[in-house]
Amino acid sequence: MKVETVLAPNPGIYTGPGTNTYLVTDRDEVAIIDPGPVIDRHRLAITDAIGDRTPVAVIATHTHSDHAPLANPLARHLGVPVYGNRPGPDFTPDVRLADGGVVSVGGVTIEAVHTPGHTADHLCFLLGDRLFTGDHIMGGSTVIMEDATAYLQSLYRVQDLDIHRIDPGHGPSMDDAGAVIAGYIEHRLAREREILDAIAEGASTVADVVDAVYAFVPIDLGPAATRQVIVQLNKLYADDLVWFPAGEAGPSTMVELNVR
Ligand SMILES: [Zn+2]
């Protein structure tokens, strides 16, 4: 069994050096994980890398535009099925994978692990003691969340998998998987404490919390920081730690600690 990476030429503030497209080969069969965006020279780089091996599957971790749109055209070109959790923009899986679903490549299996949080449809893929993490865990940065409660649960989920290596959707692979996951969990819990501390120290609107907690972010990530604070406030609301008009929050929304 061998794993190769073909880096997509789509670097950016949310994609780091670009999307990692992975080729998993066993015997003479190959599966492609996260083919990425529709870019001709990337498709050619993938088919060049496949060479004379027999493609058997194209797999997507989730339906974001930097991961999935090339899946259907590439699979059509290769004559293989597309696997993913559910349809999304520019993505229609032939085979829908739920938690525990498997894709066979040669003599090995790639197992889907449902990890909602970054998106509801996010899958990680377990191969032996390594995990392809898509945007659930990245190399060199933290992750944008749609749902902070689900995201933290999904970090605990992968912590229980007994993996040693992480192959992320962006950035370098990591061999210290346990430490990386523990670091992600600690980062999330630390952010929650910072938000609660900011409110305790006088932050009374979402914008105040963003200023207190995300003061260091580059200006072009400002709207993302506001969304991330709202997502985390929704979790803290569900945890009964803060009060605000949940689900309707904007920058001027008033927030307060729940009195205990
Ligand atoms: Zn994503």
Image (cartoon, helix red, strand yellow):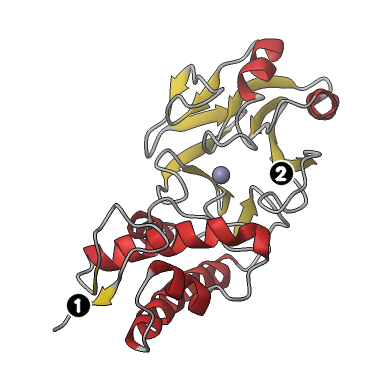
Q: Is residue 163 above or below residue 30?
A: below
Looking at the rendered image, the disc whose residue lies closer to the viewer, 1 or 2, is: 1
The residue sitting at the bottom extreme is: 201
| Residue displayed at 39% across by 75% down | 192
Q: Amino acid at mark 1?
A: Asn
**Mark 2 CB within 8 Å of ligand 1:** no
Which badge, 1 or 2, comes first in the chain's sequence? 2
* Category of crowding for the residue at label 1, using alpha-carbon neighbours closer than 10 angstroms: few (below 14), some (14–19), many (at least 20): few
| Residue displayed at 38% across by 53% down | 147
Q: Position of residue 129 (x, y in %)?
A: 56, 54
Tag 1 residue? 258
Is 152 in front, or is 208?
Answer: 208
Image-based side of 171 in relation to 227, left or right:
right
Q: Is residue 210 above or below residue 94?
A: below
* Category of crowding for the residue at label 2, using alpha-carbon neighbours closer than 10 angstroms: few (below 14), some (14–19), many (at least 20): many
Is 36 in front, or is 161?
Answer: 36
Is 15 in front, or is 127?
Answer: 15
Image-based side of 76 in relation to 228, left or right:
right
Query: In which quadrant will I find the N terminus?
Result: top right
Q: Is residue 217 above or below residue 6?
A: below
Q: Amino acid at mark 2?
A: Asn
Q: Secondary structure at mark 1?
A: loop
The residue sitting at the front extreme is: 252
User: Which quadrant does ligand 1 occupy?
Assistant: top right
Q: Secondary structure at mark 2?
A: strand
Q: Is residue 139 visible?
A: no
Tag 2 residue? 20
Q: Position of residue 118 (x, y in %)?
A: 47, 50
Q: Position of residue 117 (x, y in %)?
A: 41, 51
| Residue displayed at 77% across by 41% down | 10
